[in-house]
Image (cartoon, rainbow, N blue to C red):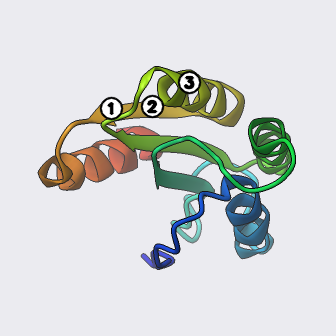
Amino acid sequence: RTMVKVKVCGITNIADALRRALPLFSSAPSSALSSTNGRARHILLLSDALPTSGEHPVEETLEAVSLVRNAGVTISLVGIQLDRKGREVAKKITELGGGRLFLVRNVAELDVVVLEDYWEMKGE
């Protein structure tokens, strides 16, 4: 399995990240996980869930989530030490995205969360 790597740049532009990720799924079948090639149609975001880029960052993010979900791709989010506003936005993202929300306080918890999300999306 391949995971796309990104680097931190100080700006949270979730909408742009989702729009850029969508073409990666263009050749995969429309089910959440294809039994023929094993390619998941799922995005796992690691974020503070507070978009900071654009004129209306939250609204633009939710529009991008809807676009991705309408293309048959689900979205889960791992939020580390989210504040109240971050939890609200993260919940909206995962509800619209058909995925799960994971709240972690410590980066050391990430490996367990990523594996849990993988197995959940795989249906096992």
SS at mark 1 in the image: strand
> What residue type is disc 1 on?
Leu
Q: Earlier in the sequence, mark 3 or mark 2?
A: 3
SS at mark 3 in the image: helix
The N terminus appears in which quarter of the rendering? Answer: bottom left
Residue where numbered disc 1 is placed: 103
> What residue type is disc 3 on?
Lys
SS at mark 2 in the image: strand
Q: On the rendered structure, is 118 left or right of 72?
A: left
Q: Depth check: give the residue in front, 84 or 21.
A: 84
Q: Do callouts 3 and 2 mark residues in contact (Cβ within 8 Å)?
A: yes
Residue where numbered disc 2 is placed: 101
Question: Which residue is situated farthest in the left direction here?
Answer: 108
Residue where numbered disc 3 is placed: 91
Label 1 neighbour load within 10 Å: few <14, some 14-19, many 20+: some
Q: Do callouts 2 and 1 mark residues in contact (Cβ within 8 Å)?
A: yes
Q: Position of residue 14 (x, y in %)?
A: 66, 54
**Height in image: 116 above or below 13?**
above
Q: Position of residue 60 (x, y in %)?
A: 83, 44
The C terminus appears in which quarter of the rendering? Answer: top left
Q: How many marks?
A: 3
Q: On the rendered structure, is 109 left or right of 72?
A: left
Residue 28 visible, this angle: no
Of the two numbered discs 2 and 1 in the rendering, the one whose residue sits closer to the viewer:
1
Spatial CA span between label 3 and label 1:
10 Å
Label 2 neighbour load within 10 Å: few <14, some 14-19, many 20+: many
Q: Earlier in the sequence, mark 3 or mark 1?
A: 3
Residue 30 visible, this angle: yes
